[in-house]
Image (cartoon, coloured by chain):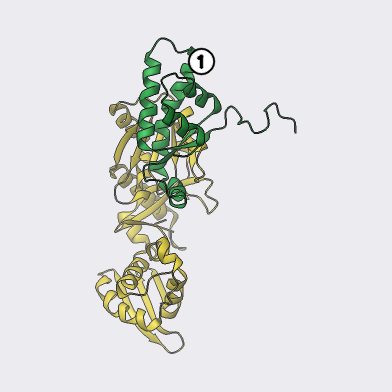
Amino acid sequence: MSGGLFGAAGLLQRLRSVPVTVADLRRVADEVLPPMATGRLHVSLVDDRVDGPVVVLEEDERRVRTPLRDLAEDMTDARVGSTPEELAAALTAWVLDRPVPDAVAAEDGVAVLDWTDRTETGVGWRVVVRRGNRALPWTPSAGLDRRAVDRARAAAEERAAAVGGSLRVEGPVALWAHPEVPLLASAVLVTPGLLLDRIAAAGLALHDPHVVVTPSSPLACADAGVAARLAGETGEACQRLPWRQLARLRWI
Amino acid sequence: MVSALAPGAAAPDVLVPHWLTAAEREELGTLVRCALEGAEVHPVAAIHLSDVLTELHVATARDAMWPGSAARVRRVTGWGADVLPVRLSARELTSVLTLPELAPRLRTALCQDRP
């Protein structure tokens, strides 16, 4: 949803294999974690008799408890570099990727299109919350009232309509992107008519508009034949939808 | 399976990538636009040439949406950062190759499938 584990390592890093040690991670955690606490998010590093040092993140009803040795193993597997700066960046990314509480989703959630499952063969609406340059998915907690879920989704749709983006017309194709958080590009599709208006104002008249969606990539809008050419000749996972089908997409 | 195609021949509607530099794509676009503005182009050829123009835009749009695809090929081949695949059908390619104004260097680039 927001890059690889711990903020996505580059190719060179993936080729190296330097183990991350618990001692190194502990030193970095002592520096990095305390300033990340907020009025809502409680961050603590506790010593467990069995697990050793453990990071505990508590935010409303969500609680994450992870031993540093597990984190160190995961970072080693993800080929995170072993310098303090690289470990700090990875640990920060891990905290930012924590689960989204229900109240935060209700207050800040934005509706976007995302893959319905790992097969990446269908898209649907999902509430995400922006944290820095990433967008985190919200999964309603098990006991949350159905009406509260609906309210959070409705509010996320309203916020989505206000999410900006940039339009670029490339011949018969209109590309719509979010400059900072790629996944937010599809938020504009909660009001597809307004996007069509903007495309028309930019000089591109679409008679049978289709949209090509790959979550976390710019959206492409084009007439049916051009959209088919665009989507049909890529090896990338994408969904090509006629405009009228946008109204039928479901919540994930 | 019985095929009407000659062995090794591309199916008419299969789009085959031709890896062109930005300058070559620009040259190809200018050439095709000039041909379409002229009166000598056969109407059927004009349709294919219009599709070539569309593909030049679509190739750029494809790279904007999925920059990783072409980047992976460029990394392996060592091609320049401005090299992109322009995917043309056999008919579209023929419509370009029959243009008398096609420069030899661009013809070579289109025929050898690499910059």
Disc 1 is placed on an element classified as: helix
Q: Quadrant of the N terminus of chain B?
A: top right
Where residue B105 sits, quadrant-wise, is top left
Mark 1 is on which residue type? Val
- Residue visible at 52% across and 23% down? B94
- Residue visible at 47% across and 63% down? A142
Q: Answer yes or no: is residue A179 visible.
A: yes
Task: Give the percent coordinates (x, y) of residue A24.
Answer: 35, 81
Q: Residue furthest front?
A: B104
Above or below for B39 versus A123: above
Q: Note the chain letter of the green one.
A: B
Above or below for A26 versus A121: below
Task: Give the percent coordinates (x, y) of residue A194.
Answer: 32, 33
- Residue visible at 45% across and 84% down? A51
Local crowd size for mark 1, using a 10 Å CA cut-off: few (<14), some (14–19), many (≥20): few
Q: Note the chain letter of the yellow one.
A: A
Above or below for B31 versus B60: above
Q: Subunit of mark 1?
A: B
